[in-house]
Image (spheres, grey):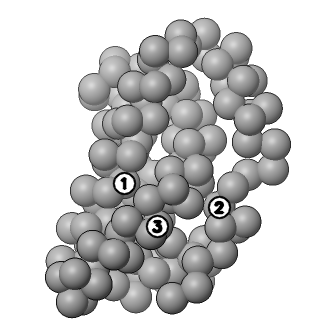
Amino acid sequence: MMIHMSAFIPKNADMKLKSLLQWSRLRQGQLSEAIYITKDTVLGFLKRQIERGNWREVQEVLKGKPMSHAGRFLLHELRHKVVHSLIMRMGLRKVIAVAIAVVLLPLILAKVAGEVVSWARSKQY
């Protein structure tokens, strides 16, 4: 499976993270916690989807090209889960949680893509 990392990494990702920190008034420690929560949520969600037989849709999301209706739905659900986790585990306002998810989700997906593919292969999905 070919993963197009450039499709995930937003242009000026470093600048977007710095802007997000300024705008949201998050401390560096809070950003680290948000990254951990986002990664944990993404891995759990994608592994559950693979176990349910949605490997093709997970591949679309990991490639950065969810073209099918099911792939787009999966990406939407993943974003919703990340926002919900940030709100519940950190007590963030929704607008801040959404902003964090928009910036972090593509970076986290790019980072964990290989891990998810390896996990799926070891389980023979």
Amino acid at the residue labelled 1? Val
Percent position of residue 112, x then y: 44, 59
The Cα–Cα distance between marks 2 and 1, rounded to whole angstroms, is 14 Å
| Residue 72 visible in image | no
> Which amino acid type is shown beneath numbered disc 2?
Phe
Residue 123 showing in the rendered view = yes
Q: Is residue 33 above or below residue 64?
A: above
Q: Which residue is mark 3?
A: 113
| Image x and y of residue 77, in percent | 39, 60
Q: Determine which residue is flagged by label 2.
A: 8
The numbered mark, 2 or 3, whose residue comes first in the sequence reads 2
The front one of 85 and 6 is 6
Please identify the quadrant where the C terminus is shown: bottom left
Q: Which is more N-terminal, label 1 or label 3?
A: 1
- Amino acid type of disc 3? Ala
- Which residue is rendered at x = 55% and y = 34% of the image? 100
Q: Could you tell me how far apart the alpha carbons at marks 3 and 1 are, in whole angstroms?
A: 10 Å
Residue depth check, mark 2 versus mark 3: number of the one nearer the observer:
3
Circle 3 SS class: helix
The crowd level at tag 3 (other Cα within 10 Å; few <14, some 14-19, many 20+) is: many
How would you rate the neighbour count of disc 1 (Cα within 10 Å): few for under 14, some for 14-19, many for 20 or more? many
**Residue count near mark 2 (Cα–Cα under 10 Å), binned few <14, some 14–19, many ≥20:** many
Residue that appears at 54% across and 27% down: 95
Evaluate if marks 2 and 3 touch, with contact meaning CB atoms under 8 Å apart.
yes
Q: Which quadrant holds residue 58?
A: bottom left
User: Answer yes or no: do the residues labelled 2 and 1 have beta carbons within 8 Å?
Assistant: no
Q: Which mark is residue 42?
A: 1
Q: For this view, does 102 lie left or right of residue 111? A: right
